[in-house]
Amino acid sequence: MSSIPAFVSFRCLQALSNGSFVPEALCPVGVKVFGGNTYLSVPRNRGGIPVTLGTLVYKDERDLQPILRPFPSWEMQEQCKSLSN
């Protein structure tokens, strides 16, 4: 996993390593930009998708591979497994 940026959270690394988060499985159905943030809604219609709503996080303005950060948090997404878009 040496290609994973340093600012990825420990929770995200755990999800990547145990297979509960498979970035290739994401298929966003909605995108909204508000207040300088980009929000993605993603249906949990298959395995490997631990969140239904997230924000894109860029390490700098040249970053072409943003990280999806669960919104409002990993904890909230885990508690609300039935959250839908």
Image: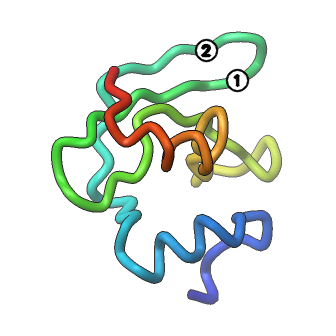
Q: Could you tell me which secondary element the residue under label 1 belongs to?
A: strand
Q: Could you tell me which secondary element the residue under label 2 belongs to?
A: strand
Q: Three-letter amino acid code at disc 1?
A: Asn
Asked which quadrant contains residue 42, the reply is: top left
Q: Residue at x 40, y 35 (%)?
A: 52
Q: Residue at x 48, y 32 (%)?
A: 53
Q: Three-letter amino acid code at disc 2?
A: Val
Which numbered disc covers residue 37? 1
Q: Is residue 52 left or right of residue 34?
A: left
Asked if the residues shown at circle 2 and circle 1 are in contact, with their CB atoms under 8 angstroms apart, the answer is yes
Residue at numbered disc 2: 33
Q: Residue at x 76, y 19 (%)?
A: 36
* Residue at the far bottom in the pictured view: 2
Q: Position of residue 62 (x, y in %)?
A: 75, 47
Q: Is residue 46 left or right of residue 53?
A: left
Q: Position of residue 73 (x, y in %)?
A: 65, 42
